[in-house]
């Protein structure tokens, strides 16, 4: 099994936004989605996960609504709001930008400087 | 970040606190259950799966706290806890609480009394609106500038004086000792005749009824009187139905139209006065000395 990856500050929220953007999902579903896509390499603590979810809800980027789960249980489903969609786009852009810059610096060879 | 969403969250958490907490717990339980079911599917014994799920999810209380802190409600909770703790401590130590409340009450009372006094004496010594714009004109002999001479004016002089551009409103007054009659033994009463612009000049709201008004000058002066607060207390025992009753001065009846508030006195140097009468009535006084004047620039 590949080594676990630790998430930098604020990245978890971005991942949750992304997971929710794929379709409304309850908390556990969001967590599974993120872990599956990451190839089980992300270790996410339940505590920090729900803290992030609630913070996103407070900011109005995701909205929770009670519905029925696959196994006929009452569960809270989260979906992306318009503000959340905008935020996700902005964050993604920022992230790719930053990752690109950092990667370029790390690739730099002595003769290029 | 949307302020509206935050406020909506807080509103829900504060107003429907119980339901919101129950929902957070239900969400935790659901997560725990589905997680345990997944573990069972992966081959974990059901009992062990439930235990592991519960262990990982933690206590519902901790989850609720996480929820409130994510919403930014921690400050409210801590404040509420402090207030509650303070109240409980007070109830537990009634003696201590009594001493505390008493010393606070005494301290606040003393400070208020002191400030009221300072306000009345130092900051706002005159009970008139715009007291800083009221001037008392006097004649000064340049060789002896400390000696002020007040002067009286005849009506035509007063009218001329009032026309001065630097004067917005000129108040004339005349004090006269009258005898209060019609009430058993006659009694001294200091009457102050005021020019009829007095109400607007002082800008003091009467306690009851009205002040002397320009219309009181009609027909050589209407027989109306406004009472000083102390006089009203002494002679009418502070009765509020005094308006419309009559008062007899030197066997002439005056209708009482108003009572001034306790703070009002006119004026401190020549006596605060017991009754205030329309200045037009002055004309019928036999030895008309004219009226002294005060100007407001």
Image (cartoon, coloured by chain):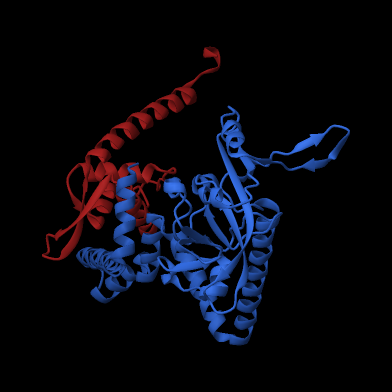
Nearest the viewer among B239 and B45 is B239
**Residue B148 as seen in the image, left or right of residue B24:** right
**Image quadrant where residue A96 sits:** top left
Q: Quadrant of the N terminus of chain B?
A: top left
Nearest the viewer among B58 and A56 is A56
Residue at point 25% right, 53% down? A32
Residue at point 62% right, 39% down? B154
Residue at point 42% right, 66% down? B243
**Image quadrant where residue B230 sits:** bottom right
Residue A33 is at least partly visible in this image? no
Q: Which chain is blue?
A: B
Q: Which chain is red?
A: A
Nearest the viewer among A47 and B65 is B65
Indicate the position of residue B8 as horizontal and vertical percent values: 29, 53
Indicate the position of residue A8 as horizontal and vertical percent values: 44, 42
Note whether B123 is above or below B166 in the view shown.
Answer: below
Note whether B133 is above or below B206 in the view shown.
Answer: above
**Residue B287 as seen in the image, left or right of residue A38:** right
**Residue A82 as seen in the image, left or right of residue A43:** left
Indicate the position of residue A24 as horizontal and vertical percent values: 18, 49
Indicate the position of residue B206 as horizontal and vertical percent values: 48, 58
């Amino acid at each position: 099994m590949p080594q676990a990856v630790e998430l930098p500050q604020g990245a978890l929220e971005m991942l949750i936004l992304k997971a929710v953007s794929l379709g409304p999902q309850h908390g556990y579903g969001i967590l599974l989605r993120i872990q599956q896509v990451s190839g089980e390499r992300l270790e996410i603590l339940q505590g920090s996960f729900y803290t992030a979810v609630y913070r996103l809800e407070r900011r109005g980027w995701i909205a929770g609504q009670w519905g029925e789960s696959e196994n006929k249980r009452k569960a809270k489903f989260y979906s992306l709001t318009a503000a959340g969609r905008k935020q996700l786009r902005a964050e993604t852009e920022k992230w790719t930008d930053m990752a690109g810059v950092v990667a370029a610096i790390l690739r730099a060879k002595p003769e290029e400087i | 970040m949307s302020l509206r969403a935050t406020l909506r969250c807080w509103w829900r958490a504060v107003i429907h606190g119980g339901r919101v907490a129950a929902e957070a717990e239900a969400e935790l339980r659901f997560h725990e259950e589905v997680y345990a079911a997944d573990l069972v599917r992966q081959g974990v014994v059901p009992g062990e799966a439930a235990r592991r799920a519960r262990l990982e999810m933690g206590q519902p209380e901790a989850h609720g706290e996480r929820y409130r802190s994510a919403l930014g409600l921690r400050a409210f909770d801590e404040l509420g806890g402090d207030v509650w703790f303070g109240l409980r401590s007070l109830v537990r130590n009634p003696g201590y609480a009594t001493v505390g409340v008493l010393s606070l009450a005494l301290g606040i009372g003393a400070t208020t009394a002191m400030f009221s006094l300072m306000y009345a004496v130092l900051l706002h010594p005159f009970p008139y609106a715009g007291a800083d714009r009221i001037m008392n004109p006097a004649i000064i002999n340049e060789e002896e500038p400390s000696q002020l001479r007040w002067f009286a004016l005849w009506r035509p002089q007063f009218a001329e004086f009032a026309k001065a551009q630097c004067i917005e409103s000129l108040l004339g007054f005349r004090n006269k000792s009258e005898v209060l009659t019609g009430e058993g033994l006659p009694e001294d009463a200091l009457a102050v005749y005021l020019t009829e612009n007095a109400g607007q000049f002082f800008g003091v709201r009467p306690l009851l009824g009205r002040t002397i008004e320009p219309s009181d000058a009609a027909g050589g002066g209407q027989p109306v009187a406004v009472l000083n607060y102390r006089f009203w207390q002494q002679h009418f025992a502070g009765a509020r139905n005094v308006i419309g009753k009559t008062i007899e001065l030197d066997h002439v009846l005056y209708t009482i139209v108003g009572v001034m508030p306790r703070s009002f006195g006119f004026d401190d140097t020549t006596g605060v006065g017991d009754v205030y009468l329309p200045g037009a009535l002055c004309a019928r006084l036999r030895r008309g000395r004219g009226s002294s004047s005060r100007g407001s620039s």
